[in-house]
Image (cartoon, grey):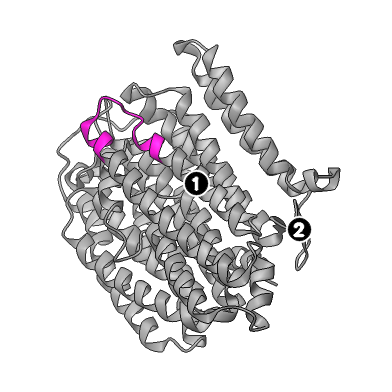
Amino acid sequence: MILSELQLALPEIFIAVMACVVLLADLFVTEQRRGFTHTLAVIALIFAAIITLRVMMPVGESMLAFSETFVRDRFGDVLKLFAYLVLAGIFVYAKHFLRAAGLFRGEFYSLSMFALLGVMIMVSAASMLTVYLGLELLALSSYALVALNRDSASGSEAAMKFFILGSLASGILLYGMSLVYGATGSLQLGEISAALAAGMADNLMLSFGLAFMVVGIAFKMGAVPFHMWLPDVYQGAPAAVTLLISSLPKLGYLALAIRLLADGMGNMHDDWQAMLAVLAALSLILGNVVAIAQTNIKRMLAYSTISHVGFILLGILAASPAGYSAAMFYTIVYSMMSAGAFAVMILLSSNGVEAENLDDFKGLAKRSPWYALMMLMIMFSLAGIPVFVGFFAKWQVIAAAIQAGFVGLSVLAVVTAVIGAFYYLRVVKLMYFDEPENTAPVTAPIDFRAVLSVNGLAMLGLGVFSGGLIGVCVRAFA
């Protein structure tokens, strides 16, 4: 290990150190001054972004470190920057809810930062060993976060279900990796790709290994038919935790899929394209259709997540730089949209009681016209209505899929997106055309209101000026 290698991993080292610092500092902070933990965590994310920007890799260049288990490239740097941004927003949104619910404890911040570290390790993985290390760090942190409210029976049930099914998915993925290792004799993704290109691997063992790996990835992403854990975990977890697990891990799971399938198993793309096509089609259909029947907004957004996973898979299965960049653009945009939607739910919660039913959104336009407008922009973007950024995200992945020859699947994506627009527009209808059941004023700290306003306006701004972010994603795969 030399200094240059440590410099490549400096953002990860910094986040690991600061997660421990936040954990230790919280022990010496009184309940009245718990805001210090929040401030320290946000400052850590700002400095991590600065460090990442200062050592950002040029377009088209990459460097390996730690015996070729860690890679630093443009794709990883861009995803890390957006991971910091999303988590900083989550911290601001969560603080308001955690205070009201009596859950404002340092564990939330330290566990969230360890989850971020897991995402960062997955993003920079150049070996199946590193991939699994990052995945488990993210997973174990997420399990503990779901059980943050120890007095909640539904939270404990959700955490147990998440842990059992998540462990099963990890085991399946690890078994697939072991088969690929047995077939190729290497854990390094670059060496696996070279072995496949040279035809030096056992095809039968590789096929079984690839199938297990795809199942593991689908489990983690929440794709149908491996989605059974997702709605229950979303509903059972505290709103602040649902906010986190609905957005930040998606960036890590995108990296998980691209590193394993594109970087490692790219020469078997005909095999995994067919598998992803089935997963994408099922996710698009079930996610959008079942979401219509939901009256709980957490469950509605959970099934919405499943449908959006279908779109992300649509970009990945294109198996081209255009498809990967489209999937990256979609995942970044979805993380921001999901965070904003749950933030409005937190805004309407009061006295620690979550506003998780659709009826809680009735008449929001009369109670708070500005935040009703923010929710409208977020819902329109999730629905893929033109001008808003969600439309361009869908357009990019569908165009990449058509270019790759998946015309039928692209038509299905358009049809299901139209079906899905119903349940998003239903929320808008409740806000603007129904009478409010609760006439209490909507209040929140100024930082919460500022970040939510920026989040909502970004749905329109990033849509009108989408070329900039699309360009960043395209250059990540140049």
Prevailing secondary structure of the magenta residues? helix
Q: Quadrant of residue 293?
A: bottom left
Quarter of the picture holding the N terminus: top right
Residue drawn at (40%, 35%) of the image: 145
On the image, the x and y values in percent for residue 39 come to: 57, 26
The label shown at residue 136 is 1
Q: Position of residue 275 (x, y in %)?
A: 40, 76
Circle 1 residues within 10 Å: few <14, some 14–19, many ≥20: some
Dot 1: what SS?
Answer: helix
Kind of residue at badge 1: Glu
Q: Position of residue 161 (x, y in %)?
A: 28, 45
Is residue 49 shown above or below 228?
Answer: above
Cα distance between the residues tagged 1 and 2: 22 Å
User: Vertical placement of 38 versus 91: above or below?
Assistant: above
What residue appears at the point 49 percent right and 60 percent down from the top-left corner?
331
Q: Residue at x 52, y 54 (%)?
A: 252
Left or right: 17 in relation to 4: left
Q: Which mark is residue 64?
A: 2
Q: Nearer the viewer, residue 243 or 434?
A: 243
364 left or right, relative to 266: left
Amino acid type, callout 2: Leu
Q: Is residue 129 visible?
A: yes
Residue 2 percent location from the top left of the image: 84, 44
Q: Nearer the viewer, residue 351 or 143?
A: 143
Viewer can see residue 460:
no
What secondary structure is found at the residue carrying circle 2? strand
The segment highlighted magenta reads 143-157
